[in-house]
Amino acid sequence: MLTLQSYLTLGAIIFSIGVIGIVINRKNIIIIMMCIELLLIAVNFNFIAFSYFNQDLAGQIFVFFILTVAAAEAAIGLAILVALYRNKKTIDVQELNSLRN
Amino acid sequence: MLINELYFILPELIITSCICLLVLINSLAKNLRQYSGVLIGSAAMMACIFVSLILFSENSVDIFNNHFRVDNLATGLKLVTFITTLIVILGTNTDKLNADSEIILIELFAVLGVLILCSANNLLTLYLGLETLTLSMYGLVASKRSSEIATESAMKFFIQGAIASAFFLYGTSLIYGLYQTLSLTIFSNPDINNSIELQLALAFIICGIAFKFGAFPFHSWVPDSYQGSSNSVALFISTVPKIGAFALIYRLLITSFIAVTEFWTILILVLGLMSLIFGNLIAISQSNLKRLLGYSAIGHMGFVLIAISIGSLEGAQASLFYLLIYILMTSVAFMCLEVLSNKNRSIVTLSDIKDLNSSHPWIALIMLFSMFSMVGIPPFIGFYAKWIVLSELLNAGMLSVSITAIIMSVIAAFYYLRVVWYMYFEKTELPVMQKGSTLIQKSTLSIIGVMILLMGLYPSPMIDFCKSIISPFILID
């Protein structure tokens, strides 16, 4: 029998994987975007678990909104990425260093 | 029922219909593009100012199943948003709008987000408002598509913003789990217990708030995005989103979670002090004027946050007053840069404004007003903003915090006065000679520049305004 704790732990683990992935990633921006999606999925997990175990629908409705916003966010992020690639010809995180004093 | 409720969201409806109209014009009538943004945008803002002045006299109501609250704070902050946006739109250079006429359209989207944030009475509404604002800000920063630094700063801004909103959401989900509700009215109950889970959730939420303010650990997008974006976009993103951030902190912390005030005030105090120290110290070494203003904005946000961390009604009023004055001073500074720039030459570094006094004495004088006001020299209005915050800190017995704030203001004087030095006493072979700004821009700049001085001589209407929109908290039993 899965309890609320197991779902929350899974959510916390996914969230941590997302954060760690962003912090230690030194390669490319696509991986950062995948990690951002992981963060949002962890949040969705929490909401659905709470919603199911507390018998309250608001959490599941919130998840629909998060999914919509995440899609819009990913669209904007990829659009910026395409514009960046056109200008710099690279999506390497290390190359993003032209903003200096 | 519904028709009555629509009356209270009239400003939002006006903005939304203008957005639809502008989208149609931009895609169908390409020859109308150049001036339609400025015309429709400023007309919408004037209509909204009028409507919110009417709404200001109404009692506070909760509409749409308590998702949306129209009270004095919401209407007052909306009024400030409209006035600021009107200034931004009038200050935007119409010559460049052929190439990037979507700027005003995206700005209207961001304004819509701020309006939803101001009125949100539910975590879901709050989140949607926040994201409407943040997503449009990504678009604004990236609006110079062919520029390398613009796209790079937009990318960095996007990554940090996405992480911050994920943190905010994680905190929201924990709060939902704790109380099985999303309504902010429930959280304002002073009897909710101060559990470790709630503290964890609030810490996550404060990460999201700190990002919106551009406070210390989440500050690095501020100078980057100011430097990467055009002057008119920097003028917008340095002013209007801060109103949304204040609405966020007011709705989520100051009036909700009264029971755990001791906990979140400490977090806000640490964030405020760190951004005060960090922003002002880094700003000293900047030679790019926009980065300098970015770091100085971080320092100003430190002032706003430490005023909030007093945790009292007077603290919130002082904080709002400081925020409004910050918006006025920053919009003057960025608008000076916007007026001086044209298609061929953009004024961004300190050496660009060398000897500005001999070519543009009036603009140099207004820039001097803005800089003196940011330092806090009387009789300019910035002095009163700092003075009110410091006196509230001393009333609350936070002596060491106020001493730190004073020391940092003195350090800040160095780099603000250096800007003045460059404008008046440095000689250059390449003076700013261009003409490109319109009469509307110049007159808007003159009006708000003189306002800095006039309001400093007569500050009480502004103080009364802040006191009237932050009235004593009403506890719901």
Image (cartoon, coloured by chain):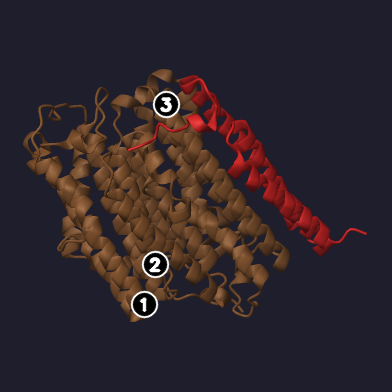
Chain colours: A red, B brown
Q: Is residue B164 left or right of residue B381?
A: right
Q: Are marks 3 and 2 in contact (CB under 8 Å)?
A: no
Q: Earlier in the sequence, mark 3 or mark 1?
A: 3
Q: Earlier in the sequence, mark 3 or mark 2?
A: 3
Q: Is residue B122 left or right of residue B177?
A: left
Q: Nearer the viewer, residue B132 or B266?
A: B266
Q: Circle 2 is placed at which residue position? A: B306
Give the percent coordinates (x, y) of residue B23. 49, 29
Give the percent coordinates (x, y) of residue B299. 34, 56
Residue A72 seen in the figure: no
Judge whether B439 appears above or below A11 on screen.
Answer: above
The quadrant where residue B80 appears: bottom left
Badge 1 marks a residue whose secondary structure is loop
Give the percent coordinates (x, y) of residue B241. 43, 49
Q: Circle 1 is placed at which residue position? A: B398
Q: Circle 3 is placed at which residue position? A: B148
Q: Is residue B199 left or right of residue A57?
A: left
Q: Are marks 1 and 2 in contact (CB under 8 Å)?
A: yes
Residue B345 seen in the figure: yes
Q: Chain of mark 1?
A: B
Q: CA distance from mark 3 to mark 1?
A: 45 Å
The quadrant where residue B37 appears: top left
Q: For the point 50% across and 47% down, which residue is it?
A: B113
Q: CA distance from mark 1 to mark 2?
A: 10 Å
